[in-house]
Image (spheres, rainbow, N blue to C red):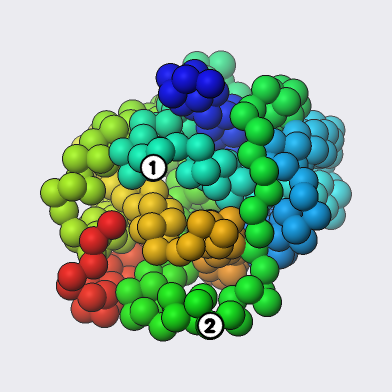
């Protein structure tokens, strides 16, 4: 297989994967609050199902990898079950059933992130240069879904869940066409007790990075769970399409990452990613349609720095510092830190904060809500700047 064909196949994989993710992540909070009348805490609990999945699934994926299931076959099975679960959510209106189905979906879908990343790193000869150019197609998919939500006016509808389920089934079928990726040892708590791994995690930089990733989950949980409901509540037209501007700018940021990796220290990249996560919420707290509206746009367009600089840089940083046989374990650990316990705590905090700031007329005190993730993001950036070794590069 030539290099171009390989990169195209992996790009399609990430395009479809992120299309499934965006089909519920962007507007589900609006649908649950406005159409199903779930409480803010219930919305937070549903978004936290991906955190539960990220905590439970990595050891399960390690167990399956140890039994010689190729990554592409696992992708097919997981997306089949996940797609059917998402389709079932379309027909569900009660909280217990919706919660259970979303938990099942995420138990299947969240592991595909580490599987896809490990698959890319296995086949690419120069991951630091080539992976961002493949990963950017995930951002393109996320942006197109956001635009479609506004163009077809389905932000308060269950239709995105239905379409996301069918895309997941399409991805399951496409997995049969992916390059064969033999299983590597997966995420395994026992492996982390080995002397070689203990040596890796005795590095101050690795510990500080994991703490920063955990902290970043709090502001990210507020963004994904409640930004769309906020923009709709304050009366900003075509909110989902305008949120897609974040992905448009993210495309430019991701494409520039090989250059950024060569010119800037890893410490600077992660610091500004964390700082962007925090500062954007002060912009959301102040900006309103027709009154400092540019702040709403500013809070959205820093998405590339806030998301891509943290996650992609962390994936490559960790990949470059572990033995080949531990790559699946390392990527599973990144998913655990980014989507697991940190996201669970972040989703719970976000739900509680939104609930606590519900006003008598059914609207919310958004300044008080956004103040929490803003302070956490800025605080996490300050911690990382002080604690991370100054000499660290990718």
Q: Does residue 240 show up? A: no
- At 66% from the left and 59% from the top, the residue drawn is 185
Q: In the rendering, at what x and y percent does residue 265 appear?
A: 18, 59
Q: In the rendering, at what x and y percent does residue 80 appear?
A: 80, 34
Who is closer to the viewer here, 377 or 383? 383
Q: In the rendering, at what x and y percent does residue 10 appear?
A: 52, 29
Q: Quadrant of residue 158?
A: top right
Q: Residue furthest left?
A: 263
Assign a secondary structure to mark 1.
helix
The label shown at residue 178 is none
- At 80% from the left and 55% from the top, the residue drawn is 67
The vertical placement of 295 against 146, above or below, is below
Who is closer to the viewer here, 156 or 212? 212
256 to the left or right of 79: left
How packed is label 1: few (under 14 Cα within 10 Å), some, or many (20 or more)?
Answer: some
Who is closer to the viewer here, 285 or 176? 176
The vertical placement of 394 against 229, above or below, is below
Give the residue at mark 1.
127
- At 64% from the left and 53% from the top, the residue drawn is 184
Give the residue at mark 2.
195
Q: Does residue 148 show up? A: yes
Task: Count up the numbered dots.
Answer: 2
Q: In the rendering, at what x and y percent does residue 302 appear?
A: 28, 44
- At 36% from the left and 35% from the top, the residue drawn is 130
Q: Quadrant of the C terminus?
A: bottom left
Assign a secondary structure to mark 2.
helix
Q: Closer to the camera: disc 2 or disc 1?
A: 2
Of labels 2 and 1, earlier in sequence is: 1
The vertical placement of 47 against 304, above or below, is below
């Amino acid at each position: 297989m030539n290099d171009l064909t390989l990169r195209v196949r992996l790009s399609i994989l990430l395009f479809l994967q992120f299309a499934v993710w965006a089909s519920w992540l962007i507007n589900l909070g609006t649908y649950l609050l406005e159409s199903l009348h779930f409480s803010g805490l219930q919305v937070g609990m549903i978004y936290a199902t991906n955190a539960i999945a990220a905590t439970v699934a990595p050891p399960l994926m390690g167990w399956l990898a140890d039994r010689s299931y190729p990554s592409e076959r696992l992708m097919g099975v997981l997306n089949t079950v996940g797609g059917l679960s998402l389709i079932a959510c379309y027909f569900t209106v009660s909280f217990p059933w919706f919660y259970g189905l979303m938990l099942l979906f995420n138990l299947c879908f969240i592991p595909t992130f580490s599987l896809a990343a490990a698959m890319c790193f296995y086949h690419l000869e120069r991951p630091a240069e080539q992976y961002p150019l493949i990963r950017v197609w995930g951002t393109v998919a996320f942006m197109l879904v956001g635009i479609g939500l506004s163009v077809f006016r389905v932000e308060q509808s269950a239709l995105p869940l239905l379409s996301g389920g069918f895309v997941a089934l399409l991805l399951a079928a496409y997995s049969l066409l992916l390059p064969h990726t033999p299983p590597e040892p997966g995420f395994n708590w026992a492996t982390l007790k080995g002397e070689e791994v203990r040596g890796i995690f005795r590095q101050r930089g690795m510990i500080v990075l994991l703490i920063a990733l955990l902290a970043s989950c709090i502001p990210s949980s507020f963004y994904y769970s409640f930004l769309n409901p906020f923009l709709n509540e304050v009366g900003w037209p075509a909110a989902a399409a305008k949120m897609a501007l974040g992905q448009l700018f993210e495309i430019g940021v991701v494409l520039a990452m090989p250059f950024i990796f060569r010119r800037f220290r890893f410490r600077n990249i992660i610091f500004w990613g964390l700082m962007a996560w925090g500062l954007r919420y002060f912009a959301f707290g102040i900006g309103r349609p027709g009154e400092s509206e540019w702040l709403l746009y500013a809070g959205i367009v820093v998405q590339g720095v806030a998301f891509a600089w943290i996650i992609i840089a962390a994936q490559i940083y960790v990949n470059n510092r572990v033995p080949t046989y531990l790559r699946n374990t390392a990527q599973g650990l990144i998913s655990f830190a980014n989507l697991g316990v940190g996201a669970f705590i972040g989703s719970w905090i976000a739900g509680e904060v939104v609930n606590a700031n519900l006003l008598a007329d059914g609207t919310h005190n958004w300044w008080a809500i956004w103040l929490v993730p803003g302070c956490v993001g800025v605080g996490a950036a300050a911690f990382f700047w002080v604690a991370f070794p100054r000499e660290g590069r990718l």
